[in-house]
Image (tube, rainbow, N blue to C red):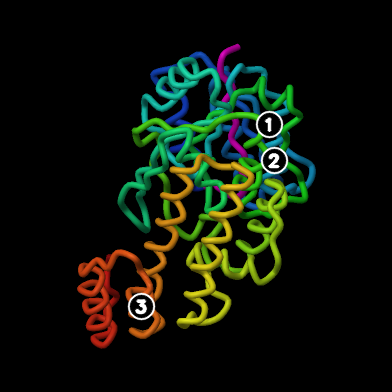
């Protein structure tokens, strides 16, 4: 079998029919479909059992394992050359499966790939992900090189290298940890197309979560898997690059973060874990993007960042002025 489609399900009853209809109606139709219900407390399992398609296999778990454990149970059952992940509250665009199978066939060195997300629901827009192998690898220290809900994995890499999701992994961010585990064994890539409609709202696993707390856990584990030493102080600085702040940032924090980027740059020059040019671009982007997270703490940290930047883009001063004015008026400025 060429393709196994896996769908971990936990309390997604209102969205299941729409999601699975987008699977059943794919232009690429030759696949097996494995839905694992992770001991849902709503009627997700009952809704799954009303679906009628000979390709569908429903696996109810006896206890709740979390997203990592549920996904791994589905992977263990998959028979396909490729394993394609679907999240039960998203909608797959009609040619998603065909695009991804063709991309993996054409790139045998790639172990996992994905594409862009079309947002809908509580937020609209397009989330883009890096395309080249180098840019995907350079992303590993700062986030997901491939988005899990639009991912396809090469089963032979998982089986031959014993790559698995662990039940004890965090219930948020387990995908980032998995990509770090996979990184020594395969390349990543993405197609330059939106593959799914990604539903934004209260049902998202990150909704209402303290990003700083859960990201700290993930960052420590990702660095450990990549063999990069990380102190607690360095972890806090890395979180600054993810726009997660343990304390309101000031000039000293910005200076320390800039030094931390220099430390990562030197580390990579010695160990060559990431392609040099792509990694340099990613470090610069971490610095540049930080500016837009600072105005909510007042003008001082944003202006400090501006003065510390090698390239001073005056459009950022315009953004800061608009943000500050809107804040005074009780409105939220948009970037």
Q: CA distance from mark 1 to mark 2?
A: 7 Å
Up-down relation of residue 134 to residue 82 (above or below)? below
Residue 295 or residue 276, whichever sits in front? 276
Residue 51: quadrant of the picture: top right
Residue that mark 3 sits on: 302
Q: Residues within 10 Å of mark 1 (few under 14, many from 20)?
A: many
Q: CA distance from mark 3 to mark 1?
A: 46 Å
**Upstream in sequence: badge 3 or badge 2:** 2
Residue that mark 2 sits on: 70
Q: Are marks 1 and 2 in contact (CB under 8 Å)?
A: yes
Residue that mark 1 sits on: 74
**Upstream in sequence: badge 3 or badge 1:** 1
Q: Residue at x 62, y 55 (%)?
A: 172
The quadrant of the rendering that contains the C terminus is: bottom left
Query: SS class of the residue under badge 1?
Result: helix
Query: SS class of the residue under badge 3?
Result: helix
Q: Residue at x 39, y 34 (%)?
A: 195
- Residue 150 location, x and y as percent? 48, 36
**What is the magenta range?**
1-13
């Amino acid at each position: 079998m060429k393709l196994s489609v896996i769908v971990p399900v936990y309390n997604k009853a209102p969205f299941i029919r729409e999601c699975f209809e987008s699977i059943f109606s794919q232009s690429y139709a030759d696949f097996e479909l494995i839905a694992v219900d992770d001991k849902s407390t709503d009627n997700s399992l009952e809704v799954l059992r009303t679906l009628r398609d000979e390709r569908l296999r429903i696996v109810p778990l006896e206890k709740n394992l979390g997203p990592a454990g549920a996904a791994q149970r589905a992977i263990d059952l998959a028979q396909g050359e490729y394993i394609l992940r679907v999240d039960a509250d998203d909608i797959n665009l009609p040619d998603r499966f065909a695009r991804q199978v063709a991309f993996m066939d054409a790139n045998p060195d790639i172990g996992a790939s994905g594409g862009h997300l079309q947002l809908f629901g509580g937020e609209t827009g397009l989330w883009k992900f890096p395309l080249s192998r180098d840019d995907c690898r350079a992303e590993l220290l700062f986030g997901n090189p491939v988005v899990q809900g639009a991912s396809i994995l090469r089963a032979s890499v998982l089986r031959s290298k014993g790559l698995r999701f662990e039940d004890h992994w965090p219930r948020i961010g387990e995908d980032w940890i998995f990509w770090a585990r996979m990184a020594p064994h395969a390349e990543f890539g993405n197609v330059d197309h939106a593959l799914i409609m990604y539903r934004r709202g209260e049902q998202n696993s990150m909704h209402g979560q303290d990003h700083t707390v859960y990201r700290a856990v993930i960052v420590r584990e990702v660095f450990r898997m990549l063999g990069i030493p990380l102190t607690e102080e360095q972890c806090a600085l890395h979180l600054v690059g993810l726009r997660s702040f343990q304390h309101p940032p000031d000039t000293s924090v910005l200076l320390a973060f800039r030094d931390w980027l220099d430390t990562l740059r030197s580390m990579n020059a010695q160990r060559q874990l990431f392609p040099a040019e792509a990694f340099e671009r990613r470090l610069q982007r971490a610095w540049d993007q930080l500016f837009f997270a600072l105005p909510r703490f007042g003008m001082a940290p944003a202006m400090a960042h501006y003065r510390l930047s090698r390239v001073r883009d005056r459009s950022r001063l315009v953004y800061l002025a608009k943000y500050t004015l809107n804040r005074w008026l009780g409105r939220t400025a948009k970037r």
